[in-house]
Amino acid sequence: MTDILEGLRQAFLLIIGLDADLVEITLRSLQVTLSAVFIASLIALPLGAWLAIRRFPFRRAVIAVLNALMGLPPVVVGLFVYILLSRSGPFGVFGLLFTPTAMIIAQVIIITPLIASIAHQSIRDLWAEYHDLLLSLNTTKWQRIKTLIWDARRALLTASLAGFGRAIGEVGAIMIVGGNIDHATRVLTTAIALETGKGDFALALGLGFVLIALAIIVNLLIHGISRTERRGRW
C-alpha cells in the first residue's frame, strides 16, 4: 500500500511539474491521434454519406461489412501494416516503418470503419427527411452529400470524437508498427506498458492519469455535442 501511495505522489508531482518526458509523450500521442482522426474523417464522412444516399447491388452487404470492421482486431491491423511497410513489403522503399507515419496509417485503418458507420447512421436518418426536397431541387449526388454532411456536422463531429477515443487508447497496432522508440515513436499507451514492465510506476501512473483525463474530456465533448444536437432537433 505504501508503494502505491508513493507512486501516486510521484505521479502527481510529475504532472504538476510538467515532466519533460511526460509532456513529450503526451504531445506525440496527440499529434499521431489527431492526424489519424483528421485523415480518417476525410475518408469516412463522405463514405458514410455516400452509403446513405446511394443505392447499388450488395449495398446492405457493404454496410454489414463496414459495421463488422468496427471490431477489427488492432494487432491484426498492425501486422498487416508492418508487412506492407517492411523492407520486403511493397512500400518498404519509403522507410516508413517505426515512424509516427506508420502509426498514423495503422490508426486510420482502425478508426475509419467506426467513423464511417456512425456517420452513415446519422446521415441515413437525415436523408429520410431531406430526400424529397433535395430531389425536387435537382441536386447532384455530390451536392446532396455536401448538404447532408453540413447539416449533420454535430453528429459527425461526435463520430470523429468517437474515433479519437478509440485511437488514443490503442496499443497493439502502435507497438507493432511504431516500435515504442524513445523520443521517436513512444506514445502514452506504449510508454505505460514499458514503464510498468520496468517497475517505474510513478511515470506509468502519471501517463495513465493523462490518458484517463484525455478520455474523460473526449467523452464529455461527445456528451455535450449529443445534447446540443438533440436540442437542435427539438
Image (tube, rainbow, N blue to C red):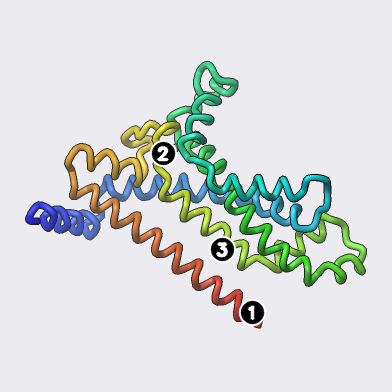
Is residue 115 at least partly visible in the picture?
yes
Where is residue 109 shown, x and y percent of the image? Answer: 56, 41
On the picture, is 30 further left or further right than 6? right
- For the point 29% across and 51% down, the residue is 207
Q: Are marks 2 and 1 in contact (CB under 8 Å)?
A: no
**Which numbered tag is attached to residue 26?**
none
Q: Earlier in the sequence, mark 2 or mark 1?
A: 2
Q: Residue furthest top?
A: 88
- What separation in Å lies between label 2 and label 3 (alpha carbons)? 24 Å
Between residue 197 and residue 150, name the one nearer to us: 197
As helix, strand or loop, the secondary structure at mark 1 comes to: helix
**Which numbered tag is attached to residue 158?**
3
Check the image and report above or below for 178 versus 135. Answer: above
Q: Earlier in the sequence, mark 3 or mark 1?
A: 3
Check the image and report above or below for 16 versus 102. Answer: below
On the picture, is 231 further left or further right than 22? right
Three-letter code, disc 2 = Gly
As helix, strand or loop, the secondary structure at mark 3 comes to: helix
Check the image and report above or below for 154 versus 88. Answer: below
Q: Which residue is disc 2 drawn over?
A: 172
Where does the C terminus fall, quadrant-wise? bottom right
Where does the N terminus fall, quadrant-wise? bottom left
